Image (tube, rainbow, N blue to C red):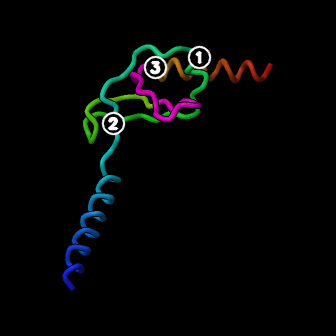
Amino acid sequence: MELKLPLVLFCLCALAITSTEAAIPKCCIRTKNHIPLQMLWKVQRWSMQSGGRACDISALLLHVKDMRTPVCAHPKVLGILKKVRQQTIRNKQK
């Protein structure tokens, strides 16, 4: 009987901690203005982080092949990324 209360409290604390971790967003703190072209060619997907909500700054998250964490780039890099993707599509069509 004496062990039940601490065990229940421990389980409730563990549940509270694991459920709140999913609600905490992972935000970019700073961005890179220059991304090497070799890295842009390896981008598999990208997403935008909007500033003003949960995160402080706007950023372009680049999910690069063979990298565990996404690269935080300045949003203006999106234009360069789109041009690189268009060139790779053209090169594949030839």
Q: Secondary structure at mark 3?
A: helix
Is residue 79 covered in magenta?
no
Q: Residue at x 28, y 58 (%)?
A: 17
Q: Secondary structure at mark 1?
A: helix
Q: Which amino acid, mark 3?
A: Val
User: Tag on residue 38?
Assistant: 1
Q: Nearer the viewer, mark 3 or mark 1?
A: 1
Per the image, the residue denoted by label 3 is 77
Q: Quadrant of the N terminus?
A: bottom left
Question: In the rendered view, does 55 fall on the left or right side of 59?
Answer: left
Task: Give the CA distance from mark 2 to mark 3.
Answer: 18 Å
Badge 1 density bin: few <14, some 14–19, many ≥20, Cα 10 Å: few
The foreground one among 23 and 16 is 16
Mark sitting earlier along the chain (3/1): 1
Q: Quadrant of residue 45?
A: top right
Mark sitting earlier along the chain (1/2): 2
Rendered position, 11 above or below 29? below
Question: In the rendered view, does 34 fall on the left or right side of 92?
Answer: left
Task: Give the CA distance from mark 1 to mark 2.
Answer: 25 Å
Q: Quadrant of the C terminus?
A: top right
User: Tag on residue 27?
Assistant: 2
Question: In the rendered view, does 66 fall on the left or right side of 4?
Answer: right
Q: Which amino acid, mark 1?
A: Gln
